[in-house]
């Protein structure tokens, strides 16, 4: 197409580009090349976005929201590095603005990633049978199991070291708010010579269809977990599988 327009231009000089039809065809086959990608604006946009993200994270997740005060410090450090480059490397002064934004991006990205990693907590899910209603007891066990399947007797086991978020499913209904009324218990079994004892940790809460659970644990009635006598009776009757329960031994000083 370019060749044909070149020929017509040679035959009819100074008139070819006055023809709107020819001009429209030329535009179709010779589209306008988009402007060059502006890397400085892209870096600035990303840096500002990460600044906003870190400010929110610093306010919500860091101790006493102290992370917020790192924002002006990072901007100052970035400006200092860019200024130092402007003074020392005269050949690269035109890149100082980019260096400022790049340092911002690196520092804020590092802070965001480290804070998210430090605050990561796995989710332990408790599955309660649809047809069960009553007190649920969850025992801490051995291993690395992030799911607790409650049986028909209201007994479940889980194993996880460290902090975790919890989710409680009663059939298909999420009743995680039931944990706002949960209780905890430490079962203690002394040795015959009273020089050591073994302890078991348990948590308990009530599962009831159609119940509206509180959204906060403050000023609530909390469930009372089983005591040592009831535990031993349930172990003896086979309701509790003691091999799945973690029992810690402590020596008396």
Image (tube, rainbow, N blue to C red):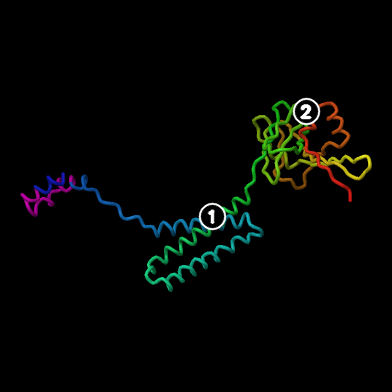
Secondary structure category for the residue under label 1: helix
Mark seen at residue 53: 1
Q: Position of residue 185 (x, y in %)?
A: 82, 41
User: Circle 2 is placed at which residue position?
Assistant: 153
Q: Where is 170 relative to 110, above or below? A: above
Upstream in the sequence, badge 2 or badge 1?
A: 1
Mark seen at residue 81: none
**Residue sitting at x 63%, y 59%:** 65
Q: Position of residue 136 (x, y in %)?
A: 76, 34
State left or right for residue 139 relative to residue 83.
right
Residue farthest to the bottom, as pictured: 87
Q: Is residue 196 magenta?
A: no
Q: Position of residue 53 (x, y in %)?
A: 54, 55
Secondary structure category for the residue under label 2: loop
Q: Where is 74 relative to 220, above or below? A: below
Q: Position of residue 4 (x, y in %)?
A: 12, 45
**Residue sitting at x 56%, y 57%:** 111
Task: From the image, give the main secondary structure of the stretch colored magenta.
Answer: helix
Q: Is residue 22 magenta?
A: yes
State left or right for residue 91 relative to residue 138.
left
> Around disc 2, counting alpha carbons within 10 Å, would you say few (fewer than 14), some (14 to 19), or many (20 or more)?
some
Label 2, label 1: how far apart the Cα atoms are: 47 Å
**Residue sitting at x 84%, y 36%:** 226
Q: Give, as a single range, the part of the protein colored magenta.
A: 8-25
Residue farthest to the left, as pictured: 11
194 or 167, which is in the foreground? 194
State left or right for residue 102 relative to residue 72.
left
């Amino acid at each position: 197409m370019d060749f044909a327009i070149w020929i017509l231009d040679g035959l009819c000089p100074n008139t070819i580009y006055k023809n709107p039809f020819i001009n429209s065809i030329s535009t179709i086959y010779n589209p306008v090349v988009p402007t060059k990608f502006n890397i400085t604006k892209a870096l600035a946009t990303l840096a500002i976005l990460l600044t906003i993200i870190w400010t929110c994270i610093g306010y919500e997740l860091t101790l006493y929201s102290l992370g917020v005060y790192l924002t002006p410090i990072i901007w100052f450090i970035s400006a200092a590095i860019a200024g130092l480059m402007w003074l020392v490397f005269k050949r690269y002064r035109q890149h100082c603005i980019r260096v400022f934004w790049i340092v911002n991006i690196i520092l804020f990205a590092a802070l965001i990633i480290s804070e998210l990693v430090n605050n990561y907590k796995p989710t332990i899910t408790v599955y309660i049978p649809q047809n069960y209603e009553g007190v649920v007891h969850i025992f801490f066990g051995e291993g690395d199991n992030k799911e607790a399947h409650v049986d028909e007797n209201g007994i479940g086991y889980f194993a996880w070291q460290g902090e975790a978020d919890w989710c409680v499913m009663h059939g298909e209904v999420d009743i995680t708010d039931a944990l706002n009324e949960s209780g905890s218990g430490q079962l203690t079994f002394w040795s015959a010579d009273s020089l050591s004892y073994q302890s078991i940790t348990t948590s308990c809460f009530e599962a009831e269809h159609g119940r509206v659970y509180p959204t906060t644990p403050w000023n609530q009635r909390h469930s009372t977990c089983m005591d040592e006598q009831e535990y031993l009776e349930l172990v003896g009757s086979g309701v509790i599988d003691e091999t799945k329960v973690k029992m810690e031994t402590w020596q008396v000083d």
